[in-house]
Image (cartoon, rainbow, N blue to C red):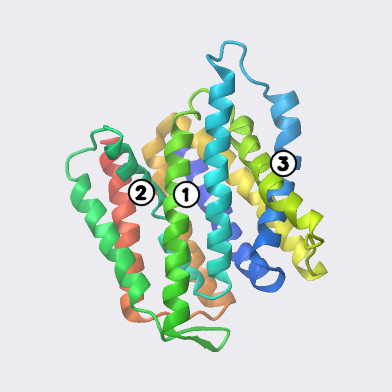
Amino acid sequence: MLPIVFGVATAICWAVSVLASARSSRIGGAPQTVAGVMIVGAVLALPLALVASPLPPTLRDPAWTVFLSALAGAANVFGLLLTYAAYRIGAVGIIATIGSTEGAIAAVISVLAGQTLAAGSGLVLALVAFGVVLAATSGGKEREDGVVIDRARSLRAAGLATGAAGLFGLGLFTMGHVSATLPAAWVILPGRLVGVIVVAVPLYLTGRLRAPRSVLPLILLVGFVEVVGIATFSIGAANDIAITSVLASMFAPIAAVFAFVLFRERLAPRQILGIALVVIGIATLGILAGA
């Protein structure tokens, strides 16, 4: 029961993050949104990490483990920069769907690292890849808030989202090596501190750490739900990673549906088919992993 509850909670958190960050990035800028999200995340995670859940005294090689967590966080930070830049020019439903392939990419990386996947996973990964290509290359007539997204912008957004998915997959693979030994707060904190140092501090020093007041509530919301989403995923995955991963990946279709309602986003039929293939493929991977 716990994996179901926390998997659904993760999907909701990440769907809210997608929608709020898309709007914030378009109004306030991608780097400014990432910086704000990192600051909020660090403020939330720091007291939890230092007071509520300090590093276990029995942890072997804590410096290396925290370094790996920071490396995973850095991949997440740069992935968010690419994702938020994509939100400024492309369709939320397509970008979120490409981003949701991070688990499949992590699986590919694990194979390259020598791990053996469940039988049939190769065909499913090929289905996911085909779905991504179909969703990404069938654009050029999408509409959002009544404005047509031309093909050049659509392809550029898909390229940014694909790069982000690769970084997210690398981060997920690295996080998999530390989440079993670190408390959830310590999985979150190093990456948020990296984001503050790499993104927020340079923006502050150059006088660009500013955003319209209208987006501040959105940035606060994204920072909060990102931390909660990672925490709920970590708790659910500790009980059953397959079920939690499958349910958490449903953030993409949830975000696509609400983008249709809130942003009046309209996609081509082939793009909708591509999204469906990706969702089916990711869910199947999770089922195979848990079999």
Q: Which residue is mark 2?
A: 105
Position of residue 252 in the picture relative to residue 227 (left or right): left
Nearest to N terminus: mark 1 or mark 2: 2
Amino acid, disc 2: Ile
* 154 w.r.t. 168: above or below: below
Image point (68%, 21%), residue name = 54
* Secondary structure at numbered mark 2: helix
Image point (70%, 54%), residue name = 35
Nearest to N terminus: mark 1 or mark 3: 3
Point out residue 125 in the picture as x, y percentages from the top left corner. Answer: 26, 52
* Secondary structure at numbered mark 3: helix
Image point (46%, 63%), residue name = 161
Res. 253 in view: no
Image point (47%, 30%), residue name = 238
Which mark is on residue 42? 3
Amino acid, disc 1: Phe
Amino acid, disc 3: Ala
Verify CB contact (< 8 Å) between mark 1 and mark 2.
Answer: yes
